[in-house]
Amino acid sequence: MDLKALSHISSENVYQLIANELQGVVITDELGRYVYVNNHWSAMTGMTLERVKGKYVHDVVLSSRVDYVIQTKKFLSGDAVLLNARTNEEVPVYCSYTPLFEEDRLLGCFIYMIQKSEQKAMDIPPNVVTLMEKLNGYLKQLGQSQGTKYSLNDIVGNSGAIQRMKDNIIKVARSASTVLIEGETGSGKELVAHTIHNLSPRFTQPFIKVNCAAIPKDLIESEFFGYEQGSFTGAQRGGKSGKFELANGGSLFLDEVNQAPMFLQPKLLRVLQEHEVERIGGSHSIPVDTRIVAATNVSLDHLVREGLFRSDLFYRLNVIRIHVPALRERPEDIPLLANHILEQLNYELHLQIPGIEDDAMQRLMDYSWPGNVRELHNVIERAMNLSWCEPLRWEHFADYFEQAGLGDHRKKMQTGSMREQREENEKKLLADTLQRCNGNKACAAEELGISRTILYKKLHQFGLM
C-alpha cells in the first residue's frame, strides 16, 4: 500500500490494519494517554477503548514503561502485568514500546505486546514496520492529536452542575451547530471546547484555536482570513491560509470572542452566514466547512446592550450555550479536583506527595477561588514545592493566603466578611481611578490594566455608571 492510498482510508481502517497483524496493540498520545487499543488488548484486559480512551496508561497498567519512553524518546522493551478487569486475573505480557515522531516532534507511543505464556515471535513483522513509518505522518489525525489536548475525562467533578454540563457537551457534540461557552476566567472553558471537538464526528479533523484578544489589530484580518501573494508588503510567497481555512472540516475555537474588535465582527458574521471566506487581496470566495466554538468570560448579552458587541453576531454565536460553573458554585468537587491536580503534578514535577490532609482540604473548600480551577492548580503546585515528600498540611498553603492579604480565610468566609471586604476594596479602587482620570473610562481601564469591556462590567456591578 502506498502513501497516497493510505491517505484515503479512515482512521478506523488504519487501526484495523494494525489490529489484523499484531496481538496486543496500544497507541498513546504524546502525554501517555490512550488513543487506541485493539480487540486483542481488550480481550486480555476486559476493558474497551471507550473505557480507557483519554486516561493515562500508568493509571491502568501500573508496570507500564510508557512514561519512560515518552520522556527519553527511546525504544524500550520489557515485562509488564495486565489485570483483567472482568476476571481480576493477572496477565503477564512482554512489551515493546516504540516512540512515534513527525520530523522531530513526538506524537505518541506504539506499544506491541504478547502474552508470555505464548511462544510467538516478538519481532514486529516488516510490513507492519513500514505501515508504522507511514502512520507517523497520520497519527496526528487519530484521536486527540489534531490540535486538542483534553477529553471528557479531563473535566473533573461529580457535582450536579458538572454532570449537567457533561451531559450537554455529549449532546451538542453530535451536531455542527455553533456553540457559545460562558464562564469566568480559569473555570475550564477551553477544556469544554476541546471535549466538544473530540466527541464530535469531526474529531479526526483540525481543531484550530484563536485567542481574539492576543492577535495585534493590524494582523487580525490576515490571521482569520488569510491573504494572497503580493497583497501587501511582507506577504509571504504563495500567500497564506487563514484560521477558517485551516479549520476546514474541523472546528475553530474563538477564545475570548468578547474581545473581537468591532471592525472584525461583521466579517466574522459573513463567514458564519455564507460559509465562505475571501482572502486579503483575493478575487474569489473560498468555501469552508468549519464548526465554530466560541468562549467568553463576560456575558455577551450585556455587551450587546452596551453597544460593545454586534447583536447579529451574538445571535449567530448563541445557537447553543453552555455555562461552565465557577469553582465556588461546586465546592463539593474541590477534593476530587485537588487530588486529580496533585496526581498530575506528581508526574510532571517528578514528586511523590502522598495526599492532602483533611484539615487543609476543608480550608480549601471554604475558600471562594476567584481564579477558579487555574488558581487551585497554582496553589497546589506552590504547596507541593514547599513540602518534602509528605502529605500537604495547612502550613504548606497558609503562606499563599497570607501573602494575598486573606489571613485565616476560613473564618472570614464563614462570616461572609472576606467577600464583602474584597468587593468594597475593589469598588473603592475603581472609584478612585475614575476620579484620577476625570471620568475617562479608556484612561481608567489602561491604568487598571484591564479591558474596557471588563471595566464596564465592574462599573455596572458596583453601581458606578
Image (tube, rainbow, N blue to C red):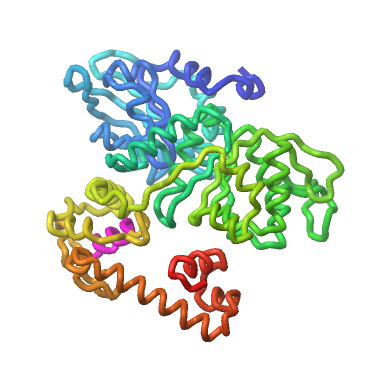
Occupied quadrant, residue 153: top left
* 313 vs 111: above or below: below
The residue lying toward the viewer, choosing from 438 and 381, is: 438
Q: Is residue 98 visible?
A: no
User: Tag count in the figure?
Assistant: 0
Considering the image in quadrants, where does the N terminus appear? Answer: top right
The residue lying toward the viewer, choosing from 289 and 318, is: 318
In the displayed image of the protein, which residue is found farthest to the right? 283
Which residue shows up at 73% across the image and 53% down it? 222
Which residue shows up at 79% across the image and 55% down it? 235
Q: Is residue 248 visible?
A: yes
Q: Is residue 172 left or right of residue 341?
A: right
**Residue 395, x across and y down, in percent:** 16, 67
Which residue shows up at 53% across the image and 78% down it? 447
The residue lying toward the viewer, choosing from 22 and 157, is: 157
Q: Which residues are magenta?
A: 376-386
Q: Is residue 385 magenta?
A: yes
Q: Is residue 42 left or right of residue 257?
A: left
**Residue 438, x across and y down, in percent:** 57, 84
Q: Is residue 425 magenta?
A: no
Q: Main secondary structure of the magenta part?
A: helix
Which residue shows up at 28% across the image and 48% down it? 337
Q: Is residue 171 left or right of residue 288?
A: left
**Residue 323, x across and y down, in percent:** 43, 45
**Residue 264, x across and y down, in percent:** 70, 54
* 380 vs 40: above or below: below
